[in-house]
Image: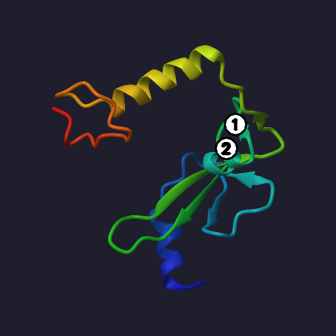
Amino acid sequence: MSLTYGKCLAGAEPRSATLPQYIWRCAPDGMATKRQLRALGLRPGGQGVQAEVTRPRYRRGPLVAYLYRIDLAKPVRPMTSRKWGALALAMLARRTCPVCRTDAGYCIPALVRY
């Protein structure tokens, strides 16, 4: 094991004493992060964190990602019509110019909004 990965495992505090910890890109099949589950159309579905993956970083401590089991994951809930409407109103508010109240056609950056 290289020195970098040795530091990665030694410096990271596991979430609990019984939680398995893997090195980046060495996690077993059947486990995924929340983003990977979302890409598969799944959600953790109430299950707890099953394992950790650590990735070394140069200037700070290791980066930690939590893993969930794919076979225990549930499908993503579909959006309701009210959620779609709320999202449309939120996006309209982001596109509206605060000075002249017109739709800019793109999301105005937060630093420009006063």
Q: Is residue 90 above or below residue 31?
A: above
Q: Is residue 7 above or below residue 22?
A: below
Q: Position of residue 107 (x, y in %)?
A: 36, 40
Q: Position of residue 42 (x, y in %)?
A: 74, 39
Question: Badge 1 is on which residue?
Answer: 43
- Report whether 36 appears left or right of 73: left
Q: Is residue 101 above or below residue 27?
A: above
Question: Quick one: SS at disc 2?
Answer: helix
Question: Quick one: SS at disc 1?
Answer: strand
Can residue 50 be seen here? The reply is no
| Extreme residue toward the top, this view | 82
Q: Position of residue 93 (x, y in %)?
A: 35, 26
How crowded is the residue under tag 2: few (<14 C-alpha within 10 Å), some, or many (20+)? some
**Most foreground residue, 85 or 54:** 85
Question: Mark 1 and 2 residues: CB-CB less than 8 Å, in contact?
Answer: yes
**Occupied quadrant, residue 114:** top left
How crowded is the residue under tag 1: few (<14 C-alpha within 10 Å), some, or many (20+)? many
**Most foreground residue, 65 or 114:** 114
**Occupied quadrant, residue 20:** bottom right
**Occupied quadrant, residue 46:** top right
Q: Residue at x 19, y 41 (%)?
A: 112
Can residue 79 be seen here? The reply is yes
Q: Position of residue 71 (x, y in %)?
A: 84, 43
**Most foreground residue, 103 or 48:** 103
Q: Residue at x 54, y 53 (%)?
A: 14
- Report whether 81 appears left or right of 42: left
Question: Badge 2 is on which residue?
Answer: 38
- Report whether 109 appears left or right of 74: left
Of the numbered discs in the image, which one, if any, rests on residue 52? none
